Image (tube, rainbow, N blue to C red):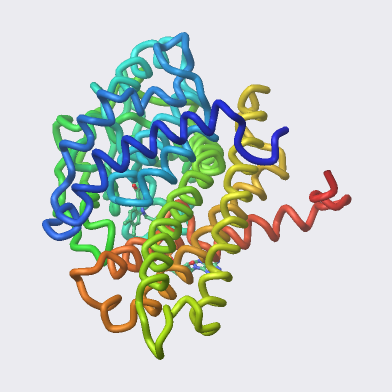
Amino acid sequence: MPLFLTDDEISFQKKIRDFSKSVVQPRAKKIDQTGEFPADILEEFKKQGIFKTNISKEYGGLELGFVYLCIIMEEISKFCASSSLILQVQETASQVIKIAGTPEQKKRFLPKIGTGEIMLAFALTEPKSGSDAQSIRSTAKKVDGGYILNGTKCFVSNGNVADYFVTFAKVMEDGQGKITCFLVPKNSQGLRMGIARDKMGLRGSITTEFFMKNVFVEEDLKIGKEGMGFLIALSTLDRTRPMIGAQAVGIAGGAFDYALKYAQKRIQFGKPILHHEGVGFMLADMITKIEASRLLVYKAARLIDKETKEGKIRFSKKATMYSAMSKMFASETANEVTSNAVQILGGYGYMKDFILERYMRDAKVTQIYEGTNQIQRYVIMNVMKDLKNHLLEE
Ligand SMILES: Cc1cc2nc3c(=O)[nH]c(=O)nc-3n(C[C@H](O)[C@H](O)[C@H](O)COP(=O)(O)OP(=O)(O)OC[C@H]3O[C@@H](n4cnc5c(N)ncnc54)[C@H](O)[C@@H]3O)c2cc1C
């Protein structure tokens, strides 16, 4: 297993970097200022075939896997984390079909998810159920030909563009709620969208809630069996967490590049501030932690690619642990690096005319979504409980 990127991956990285510089960078500031969803960037993603990256060739995809997805996430996030989240959500939501869909469901949905004709959102979180995802209250009642869903979902990213909501709800049986996964069409009767939330960062990503009142969902829009929903959700997040790690690496990398250039030019006490150890050492720590994060992210992604090829739904403990470590460490790094980057610009760093305060605001959410970092520590701790040998030996 290559420790870092192969030659093919590096040329792909270059292609995405050029795209990101020419298409995403010029739009990033405005997207943050206006808080508008970047519909033009979504169209560019479709044109570039970005959503095909992790869809198998059988369904018209490129079958490139998670290392490539992480490359895209990192390169886009160097300029605009709101834009990279569009891909993140499409991938997270489509994972459920890849993991647990029937051949008919895969044939029906995956080709159009790849082209972007079908956009998805992932709706697990509820007002009273976040980290404790098993405590969701949405219900699904079996009826002739399908299910009737009731409940409220919140913090749904891409809610504004989704054609289907990947929705988790409990089918009640003998007093037990069996968490089950459904694809709920956006135009379903009884489904009402709530307001878009006003956020600290990621301002171009629309985060909505929706309410389901007696929403009928056809049987063939149930993904996996009744009661499999929690396993599907966990297995999905195990796979997609390194992408948030890559998003964090991109945010940190973008902030670092900017702060470094500034520190090379800004003169105080007769020399560039980079030459003062207080600043130079800060930059040395920043680049070291970014590189360490990148290694973890790409190692986790490569492990996931390997295990996906072996056809497992649930991952080995090792892959689960690396996935959690990569997201946790990279997001902690992004928060430290973006805050220090603002510090390096002094008062200018605090001003909106310079881009770094946006990076600091955008970085915060990477510690929160796809499972908070407290929950990632639980995941790592639980793997360690069963650990017989040192996982890191190889
Ligand atoms: C911008 C944004 C976009 C999002 N997009 C989506 C989306 O598309 N789909 C979706 O389903 N969700 C989405 N989320 C929701 C996100 O995944 C949740 O916010 C997250 O899982 C935490 O849940 P919570 O907010 O309810 O916090 P809570 O679970 O209430 O946690 C509050 C605090 O307590 C801590 N905590 C909780 N339990 C423990 C414990 N046992 N031990 C130690 N600490 C604990 C948490 O770490 C956190 O710091 C999004 C959130 C944001 C902010």
Residue 29 location in percent, x, y?
Answer: 19, 56
Asked where in the image residue 364 lies, by quadrant, the reply is bottom left
Q: Quadrant of residue 161?
A: top left
Q: Is residue 8 left or right of residue 13?
A: right
Q: Residue at x 66, y 29 (%)?
A: 306
Q: Position of residue 336 (x, y in %)?
A: 48, 71
In the image, 327 versus 353, the foreground residue is: 353
Q: Is residue 299 left or right of residue 170?
A: right
In depth, the one of 325 and 212 nearer the eye is 325
Q: Residue at x 46, y 26 (%)?
A: 54
Name the residue located 23 percent from the left edge and 21 percent from the top edge. Answer: 117
x, y percent for residue 394: 83, 43
Q: How many marks?
A: 0
Q: Is residue 350 left or right of residue 228?
A: left
Taking the spot 88% from the left edge, 51% from the top edge, the residue there is 388
Farthest residue, direction bottom: 269
Note whether 383 is above or below 10 in the view shown: below
* Residue 192 appearing in the image: yes
Vertical relation: 313 (above or below) 258: above
